[in-house]
Amino acid sequence: MSVINDLQWRYATKKMNGQPVPQEKVDYILKAAWLAPSSSGLQPFEIIVITNKELLEKIKPIAFGQSQITDASHLLVFAAWDNYTEERINSVFERNNKERSLPDSATNDYRNMLLKNYLAKTAEENFTHAAKQSYISFGAAIIAAAEQKVDATPMEGFNAAALDELLNLKEKGLRSVTLLPLGYRDAANDWLVNMKKVRTPIADFIITLN
């Protein structure tokens, strides 16, 4: 029941106190995000970790003034590939085959199937798919943070185009998807801290087909 207790403890922290999160806890959260599954194991996204205070001050207005951006210890930016390309897909397969001591011929059929599928789609369609994969990692990071008793605030409320420009993500072939400030709650000043956690009744939430 530990993970259930951790999820009961966590909430979308609205006010953080600026206390630093120990690096070993941040590393744990990042490793959980890194180990999360993704479609075909491509991991079509990256996580940018920001602690630079001047940069965080520039990001704050891009995130509509949300104070967690600057009061957090670390800001994680989940950024997805802007497109699936032959080079990117081949690179993943080459690395995997090398690490597993497999000849390229062992995975060529599957690789070629993926290439045919993705290269036939538009860049926007492929970005949407890659962004969905980043959300799986995003969820793993949120759960890992709760386990470590580190507060986190999932954020979609920001101007992605402006953040991409600030972080030069276009040059890296990336587009920002979500933000995750990590820190510690300011219990005295956070209006949400003592609110009862409310969800859709579980009987209405889960549909069982026997």
Image (tube, rainbow, N blue to C red):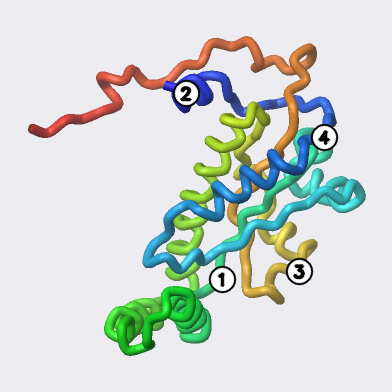
Q: Which residue is mark 2?
A: 2
Q: Which residue is mark 3?
A: 168
Up-down relation of residue 104 to residue 66 (above or below): below
Toward the right, the furthest residue is 54
**C-alpha span from label 2 to label 4:** 25 Å
Secondary structure of the residue carrying tag 3 is loop
Type of the residue with mark 2? Ser
Q: Position of residue 47 (x, y in %)?
A: 64, 57
Disc assigned to residue 82? 1
Residue visible at 56% across and 19% down in the picture: 9
**Dot placed on the residue nearer the N-terminal end, 2 or 4:** 2
**C-alpha span from label 3 to label 1:** 13 Å
**Dot placed on the residue nearer the N-terminal end, 3 or 1:** 1
**Dot placed on the residue nearer the N-terminal end, 4 or 3:** 4
Q: Which tag is nearer the camera, tag 2 or tag 4?
A: 2
Disc assigned to residue 61? none
Type of the residue with mark 3? Asn
**Dot placed on the residue nearer the N-terminal end, 3 or 2:** 2
